[in-house]
Amino acid sequence: MSTTTEGSTRRGKKPVGQRAAEWTDPRLGLYKLAKSNLRKIFPDHWSFMLGEICLYSFIILILTGVYLTLFFHPSMNEVVYHGPYAPLQGVRMSEAYASTLHISFEVRGGLLIRQIHHWAALIFIAAMLVHMMRVFFTGGFRKPREINWLFGWTLLFLGMFTGFTGYSLPDDLLSGTGIRFADGAVLATPVVGSYLSFFLFGGEFPGHDIVARFYSIHILLLPGLMAGLLTAHLILVFYHKHTQFPGAGKTEKNVVGMPLLPIYAAKAGGFFFLVFGVIAAIAATVSINPIWTMGPYRPDQVSTGAQPDWYMGFSEGLIRVMPGWEINAWGHTLVLGVFIPLMIFPVVLAAIAVYPFIEAWVTGDKGEHHILDRPRNRPVRTGLGMAWLSLYFVLLIGGGNDLWATHFHLSLNWITWFVRIGFFVVPVLTFLVTKRICLGLQRRDRDKVLHGRETGIIKRLPHGEYIEVHEPLSQEQRHVLTAHVQPEPIDPGPEVDENGVERKINPVSKVRAKLSRGFYGENGQIAKPTVEEYEEITSGHGHH
Amino acid sequence: MKKLSARRRHPLAALVVLLLALAVTGGLYAALAPAPKAQADDSAQSLAIEQGKKLYSVGCASCHGTSGQGSSDGPSLVGVGSAAVDFQVGTGRMPAQQPGAQIPKKKVIYDQAEIDQLAAYIASLGPGPAVPTKDQYSPTGADAGKGGELFRTNCAQCHNFVGKGGALTNGKYAPTLQGVAPKHIYEAMLTGPQSMPSFPDSTMPQDTKADIIAYLKEVDSSTSKNPGGLSLGSIGPVSEGLVAWVFGLGLLLGIATWIAARTTKAKKS
């Protein structure tokens, strides 16, 4: 009896936390999950926080977006404006536009939240692009992370269209022009274009449905997909463990860094507030998408400077620089001037998405990789990445050609021609230059390992000769510069068989071998110093 | 007769005949042609015309011809009206400094009295739109909302939503309308300078021009406050994208670097 009473009093004295844990653990199984994950190690590097910027701006977008939905009316019914903004007094507009004006001028904090939402969107997609390029240049996409690479790329792709459907909602003149652009692209589809357009708009453009349709796509469909993909993306990051840069003590089999709790969580939590703070500060001081200056959308009106948000800018560039070709036959028109850019648009994006698979095929690399590459050690990949970025940037110039013209006092036509030629030439030049720079850096690394760091100290020897003192690198530094594996190109086998008869080699494997030589042949990398070379020089005999 | 027929073949004979013919035609015209503007010689108007003609001969005639008939360097000014002169000279576009894709706005070198004299002279060459009066172009009492609609329908495709200007082909451009005097905006609509089409009263009545001017006054960022903060030039999403990359992402990358640099390190023993 007494023991039971004692036991019950002891149970009564248990701390609240323990009691809560004892109640929840058998029901949710949290203990096991926490035990395995709370001490998860994350390596420390500024570039590993790019994905966090994406995650946090996505959270900010959800939070502010929910607030905006409380006041926004996704309706194209016509109303006459009688709100506080004087230059629109008495103007007919859709309810969507009127409610956005209401959010901007009458809802408490409405304009700030709208601006936070829009700035966060721009920064979200910019951070995704930078994050993707970080993974690209360091080879973070290699086995086992190819699927996660595709998840990330899909997030970027969906993010672009979430952004597009978002800035199309206010139904102002600029967004309406953007939807008109999309309609033009749909109409350029051969055969079914006009049917698709009528289906999308519920009749003749602009119709009465598009805002409501974009609204459900923007607040439900796309964010839902993105939230799911994001979760999968993060689960895979946990599952694969984070990659790390080469360094002393870091191997393919370990992860060197900080535990999730408490250090990493504290850092990441603090970073969330810093991201929110930076975006809020920008939103509080800098105007974005001032829809009241643009007026309501009317299909008979258009303004100059009608560009999409930056992430759609390269598609705008494709359209702007494309010659207005068209084919008229059998009473139908094929608008190549729109159709060709419409086809190049996904190709540009898909090119980077499929790269990991192409690289794995060309190099025959089937191993798992958890140590990242230094970009200079993979000159061809780095060159291709830079070429892709340069193409993207050239197209962005095309998308803003009118502003380049007015702000740099250039001719619009010259810029258009620059982009037309640059589309083909600039990526090639960028590739060649980047590859040379990478090889140069490899040579420098080799030189540093063998001869040490240039100290800038000039010494005069007794017989009058001047030499610069070189300081040997530390062991950690030497490790970083020499840890990488230098793969051999694929050997397609001898050209003739043992009898001297020409061997039939599959043309595909011929191409593959050639590409592989480009990656890892003698022009693709500088041989890193061998132990013998290092010992010969440092032993003092061969020193100059 | 022999003397004459010999000189008939002289190289200068054709020139002499031409000069004689010109002298005769000119003389006959001077003697016979009516002189409608010869009356009221001493009125203020004709004095202004006379002064204007003098200014014209010094500053304008080298391109537009000695009597405004135009040349390969400048168009004819017959019939452009005083409004065109007041706009072109009053905004400093004329006299032009150098040929180029477009004559830019620059420092005004004539005072208003001289501009009026020049305008009077050009107006005397042929009928054209006259300089508007203040009650024509004044934005007071005009409907800015309607002006905004008209502006977006007729003007924004070159001059941007709020009149910030934009690019045209081959280095030409639509200039900014911010800070431009209402009179000059009115005159530009009336006369259609350079690449701009003209909007005479028959297509855009006087009061709608005032509505547009009222709209431009409302959205002029130099006088009205932008509710959203810094306007980034009001040129659309390109400048916004630039800010998002440079300041937004730039700042966040800086912070990320800072956080990563301040890391806990194993104590060296």
Image (cartoon, rainbow, N blue to C red):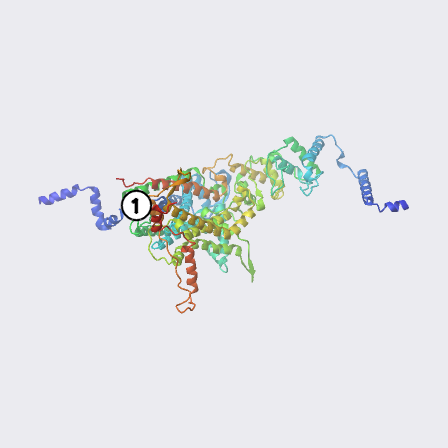
**Closest to the observer: B265 or A388?**
B265
Left or right of A8, for residue B14: right
Q: Residue furthest front?
A: A463
**Closest to the observer: B84 or A480?**
A480
The amino acid beneath tag 1 is Gly
- Residue A20 pos. (x, y %): 22, 45
- Residue B97 pos. (x, y %): 62, 37
Question: Which image quadrant is residue A144 in?
Answer: bottom left
- Residue A7 pos. (x, y %): 13, 44
Residue for point 65% across, 39% down: B129
* Residue A58 showing in the rendered view: no
Pointer 1 indicates a residue of which chain? Answer: A
- Residue A284 pos. (x, y %): 42, 38
Q: Residue furthest right?
A: B1
Left or right of A187, for residue A46: left
Quadrant containing the C terminus of chain B is top left
Circle 1: is it few (<14), some (14-19), or many (20+) Cα within 10 Å? many
**Closest to the observer: A1 or A440?**
A440
Question: Which image quadrant is residue B135 in?
Answer: top right
Query: Of helix, strand and loop, which one carries label 1?
Result: loop
* Residue B144 showing in the rendered view: yes
Residue that label 1 marks: A257
**Closest to the observer: B125 or A202?**
B125
